[in-house]
Amino acid sequence: MSELTSLTIAEARTKLRAKEIKATELTEAYISAIEAANDKLNAYIKVTPEKAMQMAKPPTPVLPAARAASSRAFRSASRISSPPKASTPRPAATSSTVSSRITNRPSRRTCGMTAPSCSAS
């Protein structure tokens, strides 16, 4: 067993962040440990070392020129699009407007008409 495979997750994370080890080194250590023990243990159905190594590689950095080009494209696209329409603000509901809304509603007894002309039965 390699020294890297005996690390705890917290220790491995600390070493990775401090750049004492690389993710590819840690992955290679686990791949070799899996290959050595999997015949006896049969712990893995399918081992994919190529995919593991691909995932362990650091991401490709974005070149400054590509970043500048994408930001220029965003700025020009935002100029082309129309600005959002300003909405008219609604007045805040006060207690008098709320009570007027309630009192001006027709009741069920008047059927939407004034009381004298409604035939209440």
Image: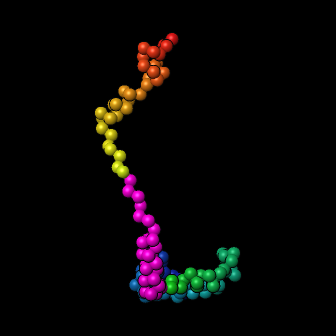
Helix, strand or loop: magenta stretch: helix
Q: Is residue 72 magenta?
A: yes
Quarter of the image with the N terminus is: bottom right
Write the residue at 43% across / 83% down. 68
Q: Position of residue 57 (x, y in %)?
A: 53, 85
Q: Is residue 9 visible?
A: yes
Q: Is residue 52 left or right of residue 8?
A: right
Q: Position of residue 25 (x, y in %)?
A: 52, 88
Q: Is residue 24 magenta?
A: no
Relative to 99, say whether 11 is above or below: below
Write the residue at 46% across / 18% down. 109
Write the residue at 38% across / 56% down. 86
Name of the residue lying farthest toward the front: 117
- Number of numbered discs present? 0
Q: Is residue 117 left or right of residue 42?
A: left
Q: Position of residue 61 (x, y in %)?
A: 47, 85
Q: Nearer the viewer, residue 121 or 87?
A: 87
Q: Nearer the viewer, residue 93 or 113?
A: 113
Relative to 74, say whether 82 is above or below: above
Q: Position of residue 63 (x, y in %)?
A: 46, 87
Q: Nearer the viewer, residue 46 or 57?
A: 57
* The residue stretch that appears in magenta: 61-87
Q: Is residue 15 visible?
A: no
Q: Nearer the viewer, residue 116 or 104?
A: 116
Figure coloring: rainbow
